[in-house]
Every structure is written in structure tokens, then in C-alpha cells.
Image (cartoon, rainbow, N blue to C red):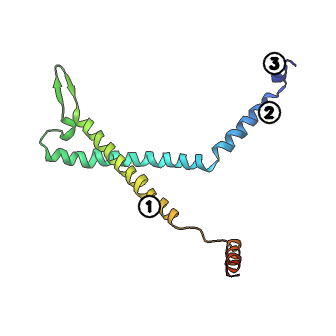
Amino acid sequence: MDPLKSIGAIDPARRALSVLDEFKNFALKGNVVDLAVGVIIGAAFAKIVDSLVKHILMPFLGMLVPGEQGYLGWKIAVGAKEVLYGLFLGEVVNFIIIAFVLYLFIVKFLGLVLKAKETAPPAPSKQELLLAEIRDLLKTR
């Protein structure tokens, strides 16, 4: 049998629908949807932290340290070029805040949740209770 004829015999419309069905099944699984929601919430949180750093923390730091433009004006001149280290420090503060919050959430919060699940053993089923009772009766004989 010629493999090229068998490939050509498959209906392209049916093949496309099968790919779409496979993608729909993949995309609508709970884990993928949860991941998408997590990414969207993470992006929104990053914007909030970015605004906090750029509009509150770093300008406040700029008021404490003398300078005309606050941290935006912090730069080092190397020859004819300027290295804007104030902007870099703002991004470092931004990263540290996000990393700290992720640490708190992943390590501390999820760690507590997982420990709580581990410490509570499931209650024995009726069948297990009956088997334990039979075992105890056999021990007394």
C-alpha cells in the first residue's frame, strides 16, 4: 500500500476538525485555565508593584537623597555616555518586592496549606471500621 495515497485519502476538513477538537480538549482542561488565570493575575500584580515602586517608593527615596529629579537623575557619566543607575535601582526594588511576595505565597502560604492537608488523615470508611471490629473479635478468641 502506498503511504502517500493513504495520507491523501484523509479528508482535510475532518483532519482540521480533529485538531480543533484536540486543542479544545487541551485548552479547557482545568490546569490550563488555572494557569491562564494565574498569568493574568500575575501580570496585573506586577503592574501594581511597578506603580508602587515608580510612583511612591522611589520618589520618596529621591526626597531623602538630594538631587534635582530624584532617583531618575541618578547617573554616572562615563566619557560622553551616561549610565542611569537610578532607573536600574528602581527595577531592582521592583524585582525584590515581587520576589518577596512570591516567596511568601509559595513557600509560606502554600506550605501551610499542604501541611494542613497532610496532618488530617482521612476518616476510616465503614468497611475499614467493620474489618477492624472483626479483627478485634478474632483477637479475643
Residues under numbered marks 2 and 1 in contact, where contact means CB atoms less than 8 Å apart:
no
Q: Quadrant of residue 10?
A: top right
Measure the alpha-carbon separation of dots 2 and 1. 49 Å
- Residue 54 % position (x, y): 28, 44
Q: Which mark is residue 14?
A: 2
Left of 103 or right of it: where is 63?
left
Left of 136 or right of it: where is 71?
left
Local crowd size for mark 3, using a 10 Å CA cut-off: few (<14), some (14–19), many (≥20): few
Measure the alpha-carbon separation of dots 1 and 3. 58 Å
Instruction: Name the image quarter holding the C terminus.
Output: bottom right
- Reading the image, the residue beneath label 1 is 112
* 82 vs 100, nearest the viewer: 100
Three-letter residue code for mark 1: Leu
Q: Residue at 69% of width from left, 75% of height from top?
A: 135
* 112 vs 9, nearest the viewer: 112
Measure the alpha-carbon separation of dots 3 and 2. 18 Å
Three-letter residue code for mark 3: Leu
Q: Which mark is residue 4?
A: 3
Local crowd size for mark 1, using a 10 Å CA cut-off: few (<14), some (14–19), many (≥20): few
Q: Earlier in the sequence, mark 3 or mark 2?
A: 3
